Image (cartoon, helix red, strand yellow):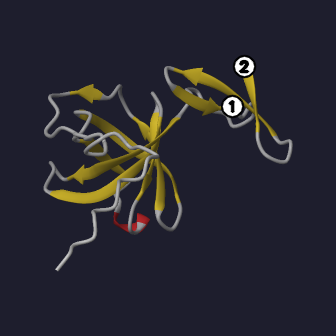
């Protein structure tokens, strides 16, 4: 376990999982560490005839936290589909808030072929930046 010092002297314990920092909270009762993510998801039920769009905010090996328009429209059990990762998981709602839902996975998530890919193009300037000024064009003579 390492510590991260924030501004103001606050110390936050964390551990590294891959290239992701995971905040450690010793008494939160979690079975698996969670990762903060921002991915589009689909909560599907009734043989995928009823779907509700959601945003996956946290994910772990045992569950996830979803942000939705209204937690009322999410059934107690459903299938979570994250198309970018090709992840599908049967879920059960553990807690609800106004626009968030906490779910646990009923079985290990299934990995299927991704239905779409996420492409991120690097933002690079057309030419290398320089601190030199460009010379002013000579004044035109008429």
Identify the residue under disc 2: 1
Q: Quadrant of residue 22?
A: top right
Quarter holding the C terminus is bottom left
Element assignment for label 2? loop
Q: Rate crowding at label 1 as few (under 14), some (14 to 19) or many (20 or more) other CA atoms within 10 Å.
A: some
Examine the rendered structure and indicate whether residue 22 appears above or below residue 128.
above
Which residue is labeled 1 in the image?
Answer: 24
81 vs 84, nearest the viewer: 84
Where is residue 68 drawn, in percent x and y? 39, 61
How far across and down, in percent of the image, does residue 52 sit?
26, 60
- For this orientation, the residue located farthest to the front is 142
Q: Which image quarter: residue 137?
A: bottom left
How many numbered discs sit on the rendered protein?
A: 2
Horizontal arrangement in the rendering, residue 8 relative to residue 16 (left or right): right
Above or below: residue 134 compared with residue 119: below
Q: Secondary structure at mark 1?
A: loop
Q: Residue at x 58, y 27 (%)?
A: 31
Towards the viewer: 58 or 14: 14
* Image location of residue 85, percent across then percent down: 26, 34
* Residue 59 horizontal/vertical position (percent): 45, 37
Per the model, the C-alpha gap separating discs 1 and 2 is 8 Å
Residue 1, above or below 113:
above
Disc 1, disc 2: CB below 8 Å? yes
Q: Nearer the viewer, residue 23 or 127?
A: 127
Identify the residue at horizontal 25%, vertical 45% (top origin).
126
Q: Residue furthest bottom?
A: 142
Q: Residues within 10 Å of mark 2 (few under 14, many from 20)?
A: few
Name the residue located 73 percent from the left edge and 22 percent from the top edge: 2
Earlier-in-chain disc, 1 versus 2: 2
Question: Horizontal placement of 53 versus 19: left or right?
Answer: left
Which disc number belongs to residue 63?
A: none
Quarter of the image with the N terminus is: top right
């Amino acid at each position: 376990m390492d510590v991260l010092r924030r501004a103001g002297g606050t110390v936050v314990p964390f551990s590294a999982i891959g290239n992701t920092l995971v905040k450690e909270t010793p008494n939160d009762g979690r079975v698996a560490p969670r990762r903060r993510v921002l991915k589009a998801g689909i909560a599907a039920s009734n043989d995928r005839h009823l779907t509700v769009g959601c945003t996956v905010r946290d994910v772990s090996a045992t569950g996830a936290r979803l942000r939705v328009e209204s937690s009322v429209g999410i059934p107690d059990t459903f299938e979570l589909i994250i198309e970018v990762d090709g992840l599908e998981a049967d879920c059960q709602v553990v807690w609800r808030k106004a626009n968030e839902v906490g779910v646990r996975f009923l079985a290990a998530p299934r990995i299927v072929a991704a239905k779409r890919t996420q492409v991120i193009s690097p933002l690079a300037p057309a030419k290398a930046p320089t601190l030199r000024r460009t010379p002013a064009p000579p004044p035109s003579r008429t």
